[in-house]
Image (cartoon, rainbow, N blue to C red):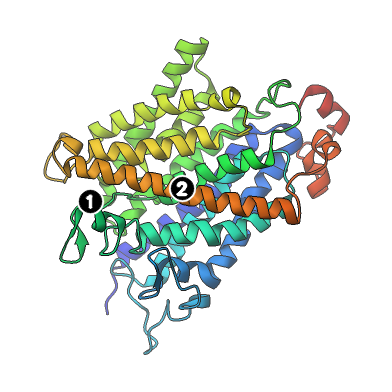
Amino acid sequence: MEWDSGNAAWMLTSASLVLLMTPGLALFYGGMSRAKSVLNMMMMSFGAMGVVGVVYVLWGWSMSYAPDASVGGIFANPFAQFGLSGAIFDETGEFIEGLGAYPQVIDIAFQVTFAIITVALISGALAERVKFSAWLVFTAIWVTLSYFPMAHMVWGGGLLSGAEGSIAAGIFGTTDGEANTAPIDFAGGTVVHINAGIAALVLALIIGKRKGFGTVPMRPHNLTLTMLGAGLLWFGWFGFNAGSAFAADGVAGWAWVNTTTATAAAMLGWLVVEKLRDGHATSLGAASGIVAGLVAVTPAAGSINPVGAIFLGAISGVCCAFAVSLKYKFGFDDSLDVVGVHLVGGLVGTVLIGFLAVDGSVFFSEGAFGFGGFDQLIIQVVIAVVALIFSGVITWVIAAFIKAVMGWRVSDDVESAGIDLAEHGESAYEGITAGRLIKEGN
């Protein structure tokens, strides 16, 4: 067949943008870390790229999207298209068609970048105290048992989709094989952010706090890196959200505008909270507000209007600004605020779709008050809760297994002296000794 070169070019560009998000995340997290741990923090993101980039080709795509291979609506048979066998070429040697008028291999390229960034997000909750080897083992197991099944359940026609046999179909019935009220997750509120956010919380609880958490200052060592990382994340997120239209069309433009609008509003919302609460609007707050808005609009980018995006972004910015302080109240060490930003932002975005969704023919939001009615709100809450429980339980089992078999934490001496030197034999800044780092709390 004749391929649409415009759509193909857009999707390859989007895949590249999403892949750029992981190095952007490395900068974002690296700047928020202390100087003695910045390389290790960045290596956790790059390590996720290495592990997931291989695993996805072997069984990740198959577990997520292999056709006619679903196992209970939870995951697809990992051996159905193992090593991408039968996923790129058909029996005649021609490229298989993807979601748009382009070859499916482009969809594979796009989807692997989502799997990579999702795992990398979790690493922010584990800063400065975890063995690099334990992180790599966790990455391989978690992406297999949590991410791939979640992708199948939501986007592969499984339990959290709108397909016949899904939870939504069971609650609201079906018409022509589709749920009467289908869940909305445009680009990954459940698959990416709730999934990673609850995993981060579980790991923070099982692994425990850094030495001195709550008593020793643990300030970001380089906010310039953090702001640069936030900018790259914002840039890459256009591939994440607008690319999820799977075509260079109006839906992609709609998602692009909503992504920008919600992110801008979230940044302002976070800064207002900081100014009123603390007396200062900080660069860290701006960077964090940007990410909070990007997270919240991810599931909603193709189903709300730009005015709704302002409300969604502002609410997420305010909620996440307050949520990041919960770790001190409840005593868990979510080092770089993965729970407060990604879990809370993902929940806000997923649930508020039930109030703000539009059907494309109206401008003002009808959500629970019109389009989809309260049924849409109900199913958004249901998929969020199921995602929380599924990922939480799976992560707890994996984390407990790794703790028992190989242990998570570096020694106290290594943690104090600097994990960069012990785990990687390097330091980010030449001339800074371990003793000086300890003295300065870095």
At label 2, which amino acid type do we have?
Ile
Residue 184 appears at what percent x and percent y?
29, 49
In front: 338, or 35?
A: 338
Q: Which label is found at residue 432? A: none
Residue 301 appears in the rendering = no
Tag 1–tag 2 contact (CB < 8 Å): no
| Residue 71 in the image: above or below residue 343 | below
| Residue drawn at 83 percent across, 41 percent down | 411
Residue 20 appears at what percent x and percent y?
52, 50
| Residue drawn at 74 percent across, 57 percent down | 405
Secondary structure of the residue carrying tag 2 is: helix
**Which corner quadrant of the image does residue 269 belong to?**
top left
Residue 263 appears in the rendering = yes
Q: Residues within 10 Å of mark 1 (few under 14, many from 20)?
A: few
Quadrant of the frame with the N terminus: bottom left
Q: What residue would you read off at disc 2?
A: 389
Q: What residue would you read off at disc 1?
A: 250
In front: 386, or 94?
A: 386
The furthest residue to the bottom: 92
Residue 428 appears at what percent x and percent y?
75, 39
**Left or right relative to 374: residue 314:** right
Q: Give the number of callouts.
A: 2
Residue 34 appears at what percent x and percent y?
71, 31
Secondary structure of the residue carrying tag 1 is: helix
| Residue drawn at 48 percent across, 12 percent down | 277
| Residue drawn at 28 percent across, 40 percent down | 353
**Which corner quadrant of the image does residue 442 belong to?**
top right
In front: 305, or 247?
A: 305
Q: Residues within 10 Å of mark 2 (few under 14, many from 20)?
A: some
| Residue 263 in the image: above or below residue 424 | above
Q: Earlier in the sequence, mark 1 or mark 2?
A: 1
At label 1, which amino acid type do we have?
Gly
